[in-house]
Image (cartoon, rainbow, N blue to C red):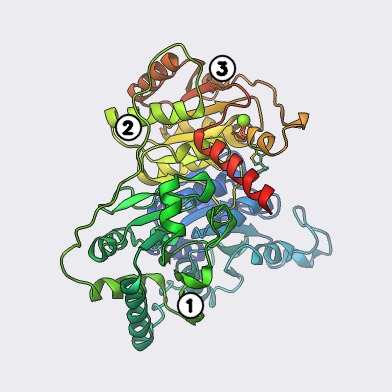
Amino acid sequence: MNLTEQLLTALKRHGARQIFGIPGDFALPYFRIIEESKILPLYTLSHEPGVGFAADAAARINASLGVAAVTYGAGALNMINSVAAAFAEKSPLVVLSGGPGKNESRSGLLLHHQAKTLDSQFQIFKEITCDQCRLDDADRAPADIARVLASCLRHSEPVYIEIPRDMVAMPCAAVVPEVPQAVDPDALDACVDEILARLAQAKSPVLMAGVEVRRYGLEDKVAALSRRLGLPVVTSFMGRGLLAEQDAPLIGTYMGVAGLPEVTHLVESSDGLFLLGEIICDTNFAVSETKIDMRKTIQALNGQVNIGYHTYARLPLAAVVNRMLARVSGPDKAFHVTPQHFPTGLPADQQSITPTDIATAVNDLMVRHGKMPIASDMGDCLFTAMEINHTALVAPGYYATMGFGVPAGLGLQAATGERPLILVGDGAFQMTGWELGNCRRYGWDPIVIVFNNASWEMLRTFQPESGFNDLDHWGFAEIASGLGGDGVRVGTRAELHTALEHAVATRGKFQLIEVTIPRGVLSSTLQRFVAGVKRLNAVK
Ligand code: TPW
Ligand code: MG
C-alpha cells in the first residue's frame, strides 16, 4: 500500500467512517487515492467551514473520529474557525491537508496559497489542535500517524496531518496503533475511594454530565452508575442531548438563571456536585444564580480528577467511570426524581409563531413520529432546543459559533443514516445554509426549520439601540427549490403544524420550513437568560 492508503486504513481502524472535503491542486493527488481506494466514502461540500462542521458533527454523534480533508492555504485556513470550535468543544476531528511537495519550496518563488512561510499553516494549526505531523518521510509516517491518531482519541481534540503532494503515493508500511497508556491502579483506587466517600457523605449529591461522557462512549455506564448510586443527573448547557437514549434519572439541563428554578436550586445547593466530563466554561457556569464554589466540587475531566484542593493526574474518564461502576455493583437504588416537563399540544390556530411554539410543535411531532437527532446553530434556536424533549443534539453550546447547524445536520445524516432536524436562525443560515445544495447528490433529506426574524436577535437583546442588528427578509422558502429541496414559509401555528406533518411525510429531498417570527419575540428560555443576565449585571 502507499502512504495515503495506509493513512486511510489507519483512520478507519481508529473509528472514522467517512471523509468530508473540498480538494485543490495541492490536494488532488491524495483525493484521487481517497476516491479510487474506496477505503472511506468521500462527501464533498461547498465551503470549508461547512466541511469542518460536518466532520465535527459526525465525530460528535458517533463518538469516533471525524475527518475533514482540504487543500493547502486557501482551503485549510478557511476552516480555522470550525477546527477551533471542535478544539474548544472537545471533538476528535482529524484535519487532512495537502501541502507543497518537498522540492517545490526550493524553486525560489513564493508558492500560491502561501501565507508568510510554507510552514505558517502548520504553525497556525498548532494552536487549535493537540498533535500534528507532516508526512514528509515515508519511513517515519506510520509512527507519526499512529501517534497523532492516538492523541486525537485520548484527548478528544482535533489533530492536523499535512500530506506533501509528492508523498501521497510513496510505498509505506502499515500503521500499528499505539497501545493505550497504562493507568496506575493504586491511584485509581484511591481516587475512586475518595469520590465514593464524598458522594456518600453528601446530603444532596448531584451528577452533572458533560460532553466528554459522550466523547468517550460512556453514556450507558454513567446512566448505570447514577441508577446504582441513586444520583440525580443533570446535564450542562453544552452537555444537552447526553443520556437522551439512556435509562437515567435525568432531571434537566443546568442553565443557572436561564434554567428551570428547580434544576438551578438542585445544582447550586448540592453539597456533592460531581462534574463528569464537563467543560468548565462561562456558558455552563457563569449564569449561576448562586455562584458555585468549584473548589467544593468533584471534577473528573481532561484526563484527571480534582477533589477539594488536590488533583489525581493521568486518570482518564473511562478508567474512573469503569472503576466506580465495578465498585458499586449491586441493585439500583430506588429514588424519586421529577423529570423536566416539556411543552406539548400546540393549538393549530391562526396565531403567529413564537420560538417556544416551535419547540412545542416539534415535541408533538416526535410523540407522533418518533425522535429525531437535532443539529442546532447558535441563536435563539439553541435556547429553543432546550424546550424540546431530550434527544440527541449537536450544537456549539460553548464556543458558540454561528454557521454550525446546517452542515452539522448533513454530517449527522451521513454518519448515522438517520434523518436529522436542523434548527437555524436567519443570520446563521445566511452563513452556511447553501450547503443544503449538496443534499440531492447524496440522498440526504434533513428537515430544516429556519427561525426567520430578519434579525441578529440575540445581539439585539443585549444592545437594543443598534440598528445594525436589522437584517433584510430573505426568501429562504423560495431558495430551497433551486437547491434541490422543498421550501415553505409559515406564519401561523396552523401552518406550522401542516408544514411539519408534510415534511415528515416527504422523504428524499430536504424540507425547509421558514418560520416568520416577529422581531423581539424570544423563546421562554432566552427570555429567562436575558432577564437573568441583566439582573446579575445589575447586582455586580
Ligand atoms: C461566526 C456573533 C452571536 S448571535 C448572533 C451573532 C451575529 C446573531 C444570530 O442571528 P440569527 O439568530 O442566526 O438570525 P437569532 O435567533 O439571534 O436571530 N459570527 C459567528 N458566530 C457568532 N456567534 C457571531 C458572529 C453572534
Ligand atoms: Mg435571526
Where residue 540 is drawn, which disc sits there? none
Under mark 1, the amino acid is: Gly
Instruction: Identify the element where label 3 is drawn.
Output: helix
Q: Is residue 362 left or right of residue 69?
A: left
Q: Residues within 10 Å of mark 3 (few under 14, many from 20)?
A: some
Q: Earlier in the sequence, mark 3 or mark 2?
A: 2
Quadrant field for ligand 2? top right
Disc with the residue nearer the chain's start (3 vs 1): 1
Identify residue for label 1: 308
For label 2, the crowd category at 10 Å Cα-Cα, with few meaning under 14, some 14 to 19 and many 20 or more, is: some
Q: CA distance from mark 3 to mark 1?
A: 57 Å
Disc 3 residue lies near ligand 2 with CB under 8 A: no
Disc 3, disc 2: CB below 8 Å? no
**Where residue 410 sits in the image (x, y, percent)?**
47, 39
Q: Eyeballing the image, is 531 above or below 228?
A: above
Tell me if 361 is positioned left or right of 57 in this view: left
Task: Tell me the residue that label 3 is attached to.
Answer: 478
Residue at the disc numbered 2: 366
Pick whichever of labels 2 and 1 is earlier in the sequence. 1
